[in-house]
Amino acid sequence: MFRRFLIRRVLLGVVVLWLVTLGTFFMFFVAPGDPARTLAGRQATPEQVDLIRRDLGLDRPILVQYGDYMGRLLHGDLGKSYFNGESVGKLVAADLPPTMSLVLGGAVLWFLVGVSAGVLSATRARSLLDRAMTFLALAGVSMPTFVIGLLLLYLLFFQLTKAGLPIFPPDSYVDLSENPAEWARHLILPWITLATVQAATYLRLTRGSMLDVLGEDYIRTARAKGVPERRVIVRHGLRSALTPVVSQLGVDVGTLIGGVVVTESVFGLGGVGQAVVQAFVSSDLPVIMGVVLITAAAVVVANLLVDVAYAFLDARVRLA
Amino acid sequence: MSLLEVKDLTVGFPTADGLVQAVRGLSFSVEPGRTLAIVGESGSGKTVSTQAILGLLPEADISGSALFEGADLLRLDEERLRQIRGSEISVIFQDPLTSLHPLYKVGWQITELIHVHDAGVSRAQARRRAVELLGLVGIPRPDRRVDDYPHQFSGGMRQRAMIAMALALNPKLVVADEPTTALDATVQAQILDLITRLQREFDIALLLITHDLGVVAGVADEVMVMYAGLPVERADRRTIYYRPHHPYTKGLLESIPGSTGVRKGRLRPIPGQPPSMIAVPPGCAFHPRCRYAMPVCAAELPPLARVTGDGDHASACWLPHEAVGLGEEAEAVRLRASGGPA
Ligand SMILES: Nc1ncnc2c1ncn2[C@@H]1O[C@H](COP(=O)(O)OP(=O)(O)OP(=O)(O)O)[C@@H](O)[C@H]1O
Ligand code: SF4
Ligand SMILES: [Mg+2]
């Protein structure tokens, strides 16, 4: 039962990604802009442009080009940039490990903090604690990420270092495979920054969801059965309340990974960004395809994971 | 000694609009193995009064006492009360569609009840008991259906599962809060039969809550009619059916379609709406809707008093005691007392 469900969802994801390649590819050909002409430069003769076009394979029928591209894609090859011949896979993937580390680590943190705070808030609705947390959540949501980032940088990094406690390193990235401890230490500040903003949202989401669920008849049944109150809240209440929260988590993680890859590729340092910006301006098809595909894949995978989590949480999804 | 003896129970909910006086002074008792039916329209305080007793209304202001086997449930500590809930007193709720947890298997919900009351029971033992219980309440193939989720059960089967759960630990008292209201008419009779059959088989006291006097007909030993948070009439079942005194009880009887004991062709619902429980009408709360209302009715609250010559029959109405029954003589007495047809 569960395997069939899983296979169906994976196939669905593959179809979505395929549609994305199709859409991007054909949009590229109807959009204005000619990479061969751009590459050839302003002084080039029509013959030179044709030569370059043939070189890039752009003179062939669209379907053949698409087939060719898909063929290579299935072998994991995202192609090379038209302009500097760099591997697109490498270009895009350079930003993936730090991004994944940042988003996934942050997600674990904000989920744990947000959900526990939300449960506390809901079970003590209208108490002082609830009001305080609602206020903090509001502050957290309304504060822009960079303000929190700067604040943390100032408090935790600058002040601690000044006080002779250099616990947090300045912003940089150490790969997980290199040194897990250093990896985590370097990511803590960004994690906290990300989690502060998101946890606030998750607190409010969990609180609302929990309050709805705690009013359900089956919660009353649990109490009437003599189930201890803590168990009523966690096993009966939170179990149900988590469903919308988990689906939000999938959306957020997917969007963040996709979003950060694009933002970092575009605005990031070290030449990579330049290439991507140029790709969009000068219709560098392989690079555009690569960025779009990776972003789409991040969203698709995140949603797939959410669906799986959903099915675990709720048999009705699995058995439907 | 009564199994459950409730005295002067009041339940209020402080709200932004004012205090909701859901229950305004309720006394009743339930004898071991017997059935007391609490009857009244929606909002009369039936659910609130039983839930208050079981400690399921933490947000309410409660006073009075509720002695269960001599211990006052309203003063027990939370842990002791929790131990009683589900094991010695269990509840069957109105809507089986929403009263079972949608994310857990039916069997799990039964074994959980067993385990929270006795951690020493093994999983296998609890499961065997769950299967046995499901069989007892008439679920076919219980060894298989024990692993079903509630949504795989029909409404009637879910209520059977709720009943199975309620019986799991051999309770002394079962509170059935409108156990058939949410079900199809054909299923209603089956479920009611099941409850009464099991009640007799296991010698359980039953507190049956309903807004339908018709449901009570073949089931209750005693009937208490409630209106606006107060008992208005109390008697054994036959007396309630054939010799009602309170105009509200009479109204309920007349609104039962095709019932026995009521003359055909006189079906009519009670006119008007149940009152606001924040601004309860003074005197007899029923007076704005009563055909026989007299000047005294709006001024003074009629006490729940013995109707002379009728055993334990008690009624809270200013009409003369001779005004019992649905016959013409009684009607004449009522009309004379109230100063002619309204
Ligand atoms: N938590 C609450 N807060 C405020 N008022 C409440 C609350 N619960 C119940 N009430 C009010 O108490 C009164 C009695 O409600 P109760 O549920 O006991 O009625 P009932 O006789 O069981 O009716 P029904 O047939 O609809 O179940 C109603 O007026 C209801 O609005
Ligand atoms: S006391 Fe008066 S108003 Fe109330 S039921 Fe009796 S006759 Fe009617
Ligand atoms: Mg009710």
Image (cartoon, rainbow, N blue to C red):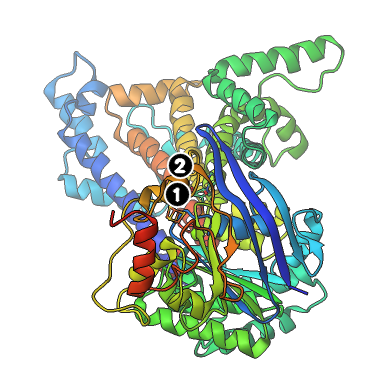
Asked if residue A103 shows in the view, the reply is no
The crowding category of the residue bearing disc 1, from other C-alpha atoms within 10 Å (few below 14, some 14 to 19, many at least 20), is: many
Q: Position of residue A298 (x, y in %)?
A: 45, 43
Check the image and name the residue furthest to the top: A162
Please, what is the three-letter code of the amino acid marked with disc 1? Asn
Distance of mark 1 from mark 2, alpha carbons?
Answer: 7 Å
Q: Name the quadrant of the N terminus of chain B.
A: bottom right
* Residue in the image at 67% along x and 38% along y: A124
User: Label 2 lies in what chain?
Assistant: A
Please, what is the three-letter code of the amino acid marked with disc 2? Val
Above/below status of A14 relative to A69:
below
Tell me the residue that label 1 is attached to.
A303
The crowding category of the residue bearing disc 2, from other C-alpha atoms within 10 Å (few below 14, some 14 to 19, many at least 20), is: some
Q: Position of residue B35 (x, y in %)?
A: 60, 77
* Residue in the image at 38% along x and 38% along y: A290
Asked if residue A101 shows in the view, the reply is yes
Check the image and name the residue furthest to the right: A164
B96 or B222, nearer to the observer: B222
Above/below status of B263 relative to A121:
below
Tell me whether circle 1 and circle 2 mark residues in contact (CB < 8 Å): yes
On screen, residue A177 versus residue B231, left or right, reads: right
What SS does tag 2 mark?
Answer: helix
Beta carbon of the mark 2 residue lies under 8 A of ligand 1: no
Tell me the residue that label 2 is attached to.
A251
Q: Position of residue B119 (x, y in %)?
A: 80, 71
On screen, residue B125 versus residue A302, left or right, reads: right
On screen, residue A207 versus residue A19, left or right, reads: right
* Residue in the image at 52% along x and 81% along y: B219
To the question of a shared chain for discs 1 and 2, the answer is yes
